[in-house]
Amino acid sequence: MTTVRERLQADAAPPDAEAAAALAAGRRRWLLLAPALVVLVLAASGPLLVVLAYSFLTPGTFGGVRWELSAEGWFRVFFARDIFDPETVRLNHAHASIFWRSVSLAFQTTVICALLGFPTAWFIANRPERTRAVWLFVITIPFWTNLLIRTFAIQEVIRNEGLVNSVLMALGLIQAPIQMLYTDFAILVGMAYVFLPLMVLPLYAAMDRLDPRLLEAAYDLYASRVRVLWHVVLPLVKPGLIAGSILVFIPSIGAYVTPRVLGGGRNLMLANLIELQFGQGRNWPLGAALAVTLLVIVLFALFVYLRFASKDEDPRRA
Amino acid sequence: MRERGFSIARIPGFGVVAALTFFLLYLPIVTLVVFSFNEAASLSRWGGFSLHWYETAFRNAQVRDVAWRSLWLATVAAGLATTLATMAALATTRTSRFKGQTMIYALINQPLMVPEIVTGVALLIVFAAIRVQTGYYGMGYLVLAHTAFCIPFAYLPIRARLETMDLTLERAAADLYASPWQVFRTVTLPLLLPGIVAGFMLAFVISLDTVVITEFVKAAGQDTLPTWMLGQLRRQVTPELNAIATVFLMLSVLAVTVFFILSRRRP
């Protein structure tokens, strides 16, 4: 069949005409793509290379850079020099603590989102077909609304005069308001709040594909609910859990708005440290080196995820 | 299942946690909206219902200025991003594999993967150099930055729509001697339109939401609503901010609702 068609086509169009048609299709494709690619290279990918280049230059006196090669920016990411004796080098404790806070807060955010998101996704996946879309909509609505506005909303709830403290005091549980705002706890609450839907959606997608007959089989064999959850559900939705964890971890570790608003400028995370170098710090190469470091962490997380995803790929879906 | 009183889907405690999650998700938003109608200047003490703070916000020239800039920027950037994304989607779907495909997908989706702060400082560096070279300080930088950032958000629903579209209609049109442009105008475009509108809505919401990139790219006097709010949060805030936030919240919800309805409709 195909051979006949091929022969007919070969008769209809001489080989060079066919090649010309393929060439025209290719040209049309690149013409359609060109504007988007130009914008993306100009304002997304290209500037990343410039950041990498800037991380190897010398800071200018009033911000900016001097065009002299230097590894000082990268050196300062990890080390600090003594003020009185520049030859004395020690580990940069301020940076180390900020790195640690960022990683640890991002990790805790991921765990909280998983603990809240897993039952929520399960709940949605087990609604009747008709109402499921509505529940999904309800969970995504906050996600698409302004991040700053949601952070502001959290601030209003956990302030000293906010809803939580007012209710607790009215109930007589506490005498003085608990200081929650401007602490690491506030950042944690804010990030978990803001990024939760990113955990629920992939988990839901995995649970939606779960074959209910497997659960029935397990129950028929007298498995307890805990055993079914642990030995049947969890292994099957693991790809969704990993996807959700990566999706929450990546924006958490790069979070700028939440620590700035809820951390009150004292509890810095990586993004705030980067901003500082381009503002008061006036050390663009250090800022650039920190930005590249953050990017590497994020790409590493993505890489791990892709490795996991290809290994855990459900054969029935392929 | 229900007759026997045993549901395989029920796991003890999950319902409670799910209810708690939904409650926690909406508590701050509802509080924010409720206190925007507070008569008193307090964000915790209820002083009676009033539209006072909406009026105050509306009369505030600065608020009007930044709100209009946000809406203008979101419209222009989402419009551009949707146009470019539509062209890119037409070029990258419904074809056999071609050279450079992986690289193109990586380029298009790159803004989704890179943390906003990194994009922000990268644009700060590049645009600062361009500003010095050209002396141009206009809104072009913000438009360019937002457009690039919005492209993947517009691209994804449009591509999804294209992939589920019926090819036979276009073939039929071509068989009836329609020129490629006529096929596109009268068959492809109308079929694709829900995807394009959905993409635009998503891009619009994302542009309205973007604060970090704007903060780094904007020149003096180019505050958008989010960057202006970010500055305000450092001071003592009044329900005026709640009123502004509520209006923008409603705008986003409206756009997202349109997006959901359109992207759920199958061709």
Image: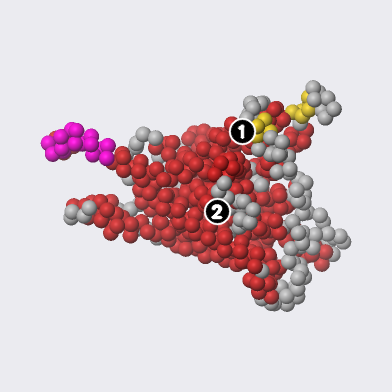
Q: Residue at x 67, y 26 (%)?
A: A71
How many neighbours does mark 1 have within 10 angstroms: few (below 14), some (14-19), or many (20 or more)? many
**Which disc is residue A263 wearing?**
none
**Which residue is identified by label 1?**
A54
Between residues A70 and A1, which one lies in front from this camera angle? Answer: A70
Q: Residue at x 60, y 48 (%)?
A: B217
User: In the image, A23: left or right of B215?
Assistant: left
Of helix, strand and loop, which mostly describes the magenta segment? helix
Residue A185 x %, y %: 75, 49
**Which residue is identified by label 2?**
B139
Residue A128 x %, y %: 49, 61
Q: Quadrant of the C terminus of chain A?
A: top left
Report how far apart the C-alphas of labels 2 and 1 lie in the structure.
Answer: 25 Å
Type of the residue with mark 2: Met
Q: What is the number of callouts on the image?
A: 2
B47, above or below A27, in the image = below
Residue A166 x %, y %: 79, 64
Q: Residue at x 61, y 33 (%)?
A: A54
Type of the residue with mark 1: Tyr
The local secondary structure at tag 1 comes to: helix
Between residues B128 and B69, which one lies in front from this camera angle? Answer: B128
Q: Is residue A193 magenta?
A: no
Residue span colored magenta: A8-24
Between residues B20 and B141, which one lies in front from this camera angle? Answer: B141
The local secondary structure at tag 2 comes to: loop
User: In the image, A166: left or right of B7?
Assistant: right
Residue A55 x %, y %: 63, 32
- Examine the image and state in which quarter residue A51 appears: top right
